[in-house]
Amino acid sequence: MPQPSQVVSDRLVVETARRVLWKTDPDFSQQQLNETSVKVRAFIENMGGEAWYRNYLKRFGYPQNPAENMTPALVDLHGEHLGVYYIHPPRISSETMTGVICNLEKMNISLHALCALENRNAAMMFNDAQALEKFHELARWLLANQRDGRFEWTTDFPERDQKAPWISALTQSFSISVMLREYQFDHDPAYLDAATKALAWLRRPVQQGGIASRMRKGVWYEEYPSAGNPSHVLNGHMWALFGIWDYYRATGSKIARQMFDDGITALRAELDKYDVGYWSVYAQTNRVDMVTGQYMQFIVGQLRVLYAITEIQRFKKVADRWERAQQQDLLFAHNAAVEYLKANPAAKDVRDSNAQIRRAR
């Protein structure tokens, strides 16, 4: 069954662009509006003509591949025993669960850890012995590849000014969650020790080679640590909170609890900086490029998990609103219209149109 956003028409996008331009500049003449509508039509045709939304959905719609459909796990989030990981693919079958992003020859260290967590999920959900063995294998690999508490990337990432070896809040967090689940399974203290050392790097300030950035309120855990130009990636910070919360649950550590609370304080204070009214941007360093539909889905899922843990209403309200943009035609069309404006700066400033959309909601 197609998602509601798949029936958005060309005309709706054109008319939305007209309204956005009108609200951006009330003095825009009717002739200018008509000329801009023609340009929007051409933009849509370049994206795929009458079937433009099929191409557009590849970036902004719901994930069409079930294996990409990440969903939040909202049960048993406070107990000492660590069960299903907080965000997981749908329960289709053990085959699809164990097959997700597990081409180990092509995977970076973050995906090794995420693959381990997904296999742990499959082992629990389907009593899958093969998935459990794959989890143990990957846990052993991660432990063997830890360097003084660091789960390091061994390749440069110049797009984010990262030079190997470097560490990420996302990688440290995933790996902490793997180490603790393996420790709870076989009680080998080496895994608990590895998780404890990894947590210390999450806590260490970026200026000292760690991952934590002190904000105006709270602490941000950096996916791409940089003392000079911090990006404050939203999903990376939330992933980090899951690993910290796992450590607190498994050990009762007061340090981990304070780290989690500091991270929640920062998220609560900074969340508006990612909000363009109906969608999320990826990082604070770029207020123009919005995340893809798949990213949007798991960011919403992350917020729902954190709401379930903390009961902070702000997280739920933002998640509800962002999710509606993938489900409701008009909001989805607003997204496309603003993309047109972004691709054509001469039409009008995108930030102005975003502000108008927020006021018009």
Image (cartoon, rainbow, N blue to C red):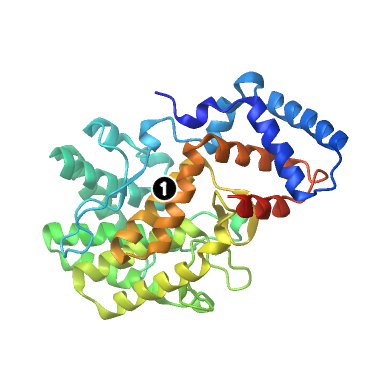
The location of residue 20, given as percent across then percent down, is: 71, 43
When asked about the image quadrant of residue 273, the answer is bottom right
Q: Residue at 55% of width from left, 25% of height from top?
A: 54
How many callouts does the rendering have? 1
In the rendered image, the residue lying farthest to the top is: 50
| Quarter occupied by the N terminus | top left
The location of residue 15, given as percent across then percent down, is: 69, 33
The location of residue 169, given as percent across then percent down, is: 43, 63
Viewer-side residue, 225 vs 141: 225
When asked about the image quadrant of residue 255, the answer is bottom left
- Report the amino acid beneath label 1: Phe
Q: Is 14 positioned to the left or the right of 178 in the image? A: right
Q: Residue at 51% of width from left, 63% of height from top?
A: 271
Q: Is 131 positioned to the left or the right of 113 in the image? A: left
**Quick one: SS at disc 1?**
helix
Viewer-side residue, 308 vs 31: 31
Image: 47 above or below 361: above
- On the question of residue 151 being in view, the answer is no
Viewer-side residue, 290 vs 350: 350
Image: 311 above or below 255: above
Q: Is 297 positioned to the left or the right of 353 in the image? A: left
Q: Residue at 22% of width from left, 34% of height from top?
A: 94
**Pointer 1: residues within 10 angstroms few (<14), some, or many (20+)?**
some
Q: Is 171 positioned to the left or the right of 249 in the image? A: right
Image: 271 above or below 83: below
Q: Which residue is mark 1?
A: 298
The location of residue 309, given as percent across then percent down, is: 29, 63
- On the question of residue 51 being in view, the answer is yes
Q: Residue at 17% of width from left, 68% of height from top?
A: 189
